[in-house]
Image (spheres, rainbow, N blue to C red):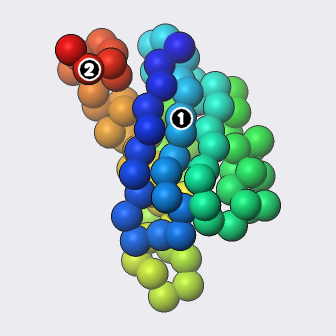
Amino acid sequence: MQHVDFKPRGVCSRMIHIDLSDDGKTIEDVSFDGGCSGNLAAIGKLVSGRPTEEVAQILKGNTCGPRKTSCADQFSQALLQAMEKIQVTGTLQAE
């Protein structure tokens, strides 16, 4: 399993914790610190076991009220960054 902690910007949540499969292609778990707890817990349940790339594309660009981003959009950005790092280095771990 690969783990990433992502600090979102421009949203209410303070941190996104993501567990991906060893190859990074499947989301195993996600949790958010802060934000709208019911909605974010629901996102976690909906994406668990789903393909990382699919979820990133579905949530990308989602906004929250007048903001240009949302917790879901920030989650997609975290997934995209994680997938890119795994593709380049093979891991999310610091070397």
In the structure shown, which secondary structural element does the residue marked by tag 1 occupy?
A: strand
Q: Tag on residue 10?
A: none
In the depicted structure, whether residue 27 falls above or below residue 67: above
Residue with the most extreme bottom position? 66
- Residue 91: x and y, percent? 33, 16
Up the image or down, 6 lies above or below 33; here it is above
Q: In the image, residue 29 lies at what x, y percent?
A: 65, 31
Question: Is residue 60 in view?
Answer: no
Left or right position of 9 against 44 = left
Q: Is residue 48 left or right of residue 90?
A: right
> In the figure, 71 relative to 79: above or below?
below
In this picture, residue 26 sits left or right of residue 10: right
Q: Which residue is mark 2?
A: 94
Pick whichever, 8 or 82, lies toward us. 8
Q: Which residue is mark 1?
A: 18
The residue depicted at 54 percent of the width and 62 percent of the height is: 13
Q: Residue at x 77, y 52 (%)?
A: 42
Q: Of tags 1 and 2, which is closer to the observer? A: 2
Q: The C terminus is located in which quarter? A: top left
- From the top left corner, tell me how far across and down residue 11 is, in percent: 48, 69
Residue 50 coordinates in the image, percent (x, y): 65, 31
Q: Name the amino acid, label 2.
A: Ala
